[in-house]
Image (cartoon, rainbow, N blue to C red):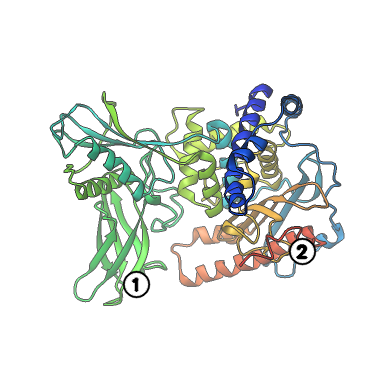
Amino acid sequence: MLFHASPWIVALVLVHALGACSTTDVEQVASTAQLEGGPSRDALIAETALPAQSDVAETVSSVELAVNDGAMRAKDDRPLLSIDTKRIESLPDVLPDGATVSYLIIDLQSGSSIAERGADRLHIPASSAKLTTAVAALELLGPNHRFSTEVRSTGPIEEGTVKGDLILQGGGDPLLDIPDLLPLIEQLKERGLSRVDGRFLIDDRLLPRLSEIEPTQPTEAAYNPGLSALSLAFNRVSLRWKKPAGLSVETVPRLEEASFESASRDHLPPGGVQLKQADDGNVVWQLADKGARLSKRSLPVKDAGLHAGIVFADLARLYGIDLPAPERLDHALESRPIALRESKPLRELVRDMLWYSNNLMAELIGLSAARTLSSNVVTLNQSADILLKSLETELSDVSWENARLDNHSGLSSTARLSPEQLAAVLRRGWNTGMLSSLLPGSGWSGTLARRFNEPDKAFRVWAKTGSINYVATLGGYLLSSSHSPAAFVIMISDETARAAYDAAPRRTRAGEKEAQAWHSDAEKAMDEIVEHWLAPAESPSTDLIANRT
């Protein structure tokens, strides 16, 4: 079951949020006001921080009514979005041959359809599947949830030495980066630690440990890394290689798990890297022989936890702390925390995940959310199915027949969702007030920074993109001063072409070029359709756009 707040809890949260938000805003305004001889910061805060008691009572009443209606948004009396249906019946000429188009636009207040085309048709969702991950995780974990990374010890620290084992314990932080390890090490240094009597262990048992996100995707792709509860820097390293005489390879940070050998570039996929072997901890990569020319790329890590432990030990040595090579902890040990690092709140992590469409973040957030419903998850498929079923239960007014998610990122060609299903998720995210501000904004942020960026379209589309070869999706919200907000989903795919791509024995440069051309045309067609929905264009009501550089 997804989380439901009582009206009184929501009201109290709103009162607290009003004060907190006002204070934050006032601090920014007050500094400017004081420079200009305006009122003092304290006066501004006192004037705006908290609502009057009568306003609180009215807020409680309206929130209670909204919660009982299943929505957390105020009633919008503006008319529905008006669309020229004749204009959208004929699809854009740029649409690739063989492509299937489905879309749905709904009024967010009533949920009624404004315009649709094959809204119940199932498509490959690609990264629009991250919308389901975002909505479910925010409700199950809560927007203020933080992920913890700890260092623990099984014995006391005496004269700079841990009398026992030292444990680096992962809590599933999806944005843990190399600089985030330094405060942990500094906390150890403050305790006087310089060495360990026992072992240095990594504990990544909280979540499943996998060597890649999706087996059908390229194993060398940096967007398809291994993962565990202890994941670091998106589980990728910077790789450089050349072969002036023998093969010279460098990785930053150090990649202890892998060995490398050169091979003819004609036998390797585009990018010049191919996984030859990954079993029993023995990872072998083949690199294209380009002679003395330096080649660079990102390379995915297969054993995320042990890699994080190696990087941690290397950094600790720079602080004068000598740690042995990391080993994996496979059972619980009695220990105590001696250093702690907490992530940003989940709300901010979800925003980053949606803005940059990061697959690893989606998987770790989704796994952590599913863990609140079941502790027996061992695969991404199981985890995604758990979250999908929780949404099905909450959004029962939509048919979920044949809906399928293989993971939390959408990195799959066998997953299936319909515009109708995704629109229901979007409406849920709007009604809880937790999604709209986390999506990329047209002409401004994330994956929409360069789309719909004309002054009359910027800031009017807040949506999640999705793309894998022969699939293009877009789902989010349309805003306008002349009509009430609407949710939309548009999905374009060519499943025949995608099946042929998946069946090909190996990727080729010609095949990748053809797929890229398809996607370019599909995205242009999608943008034309959305622009019809935005018409007639509105003049910007603020100076935000005019002042943008």
Please state the horizontal and vertical placement of residue 390, each as a whole percent of the image: 60, 31
User: What number of labels is visible?
Assistant: 2
Q: Position of residue 535 (x, y in %)?
A: 81, 61
Residue occupying image coordinates x 64% and y 45%: 39
Residue to which mark 2 is pinned = 91
Which corner quadrant holds the N terminus?
Answer: top right
> Secondary structure under badge 1?
helix
Q: Mark 1 points at which residue?
A: 265
Numbered disc 2: secondary structure: loop
Report whether 104 appears left or right of 505. right
| Amino acid of disc 2 | Leu
* Residue at the image point whose x is 75% and y is 66% from the top: 92
The location of residue 365, given as percent across then percent down, is 49, 40
Give how far apart the Cα atoms at labels 1 and 2 are: 42 Å
Query: Does residue 416 show up?
Result: no
Q: Which of marks 1 and 2 is nearer the N terminus?
A: 2
- Image quadrant of residue 163? top left
* Residue 168 x, y percent position in the rendering: 29, 37
User: Depth-wise, is mark 1 or mark 2 nearer the camera?
Assistant: 2
Q: In this view, does 47 lie above or below 492?
A: above
Bin the neighbour count of mark 1 within 10 Å (Cα to Cα): few under 14, some 14-19, many 20 and up: some
Q: How crowded is mark 2: few (under 14 residues within 10 Å), some or many (20 or more)?
A: few
Q: Which amino acid does label 1 sit on?
A: Arg
Q: Which residue is drawn at 21% across and 50% down?
A: 318
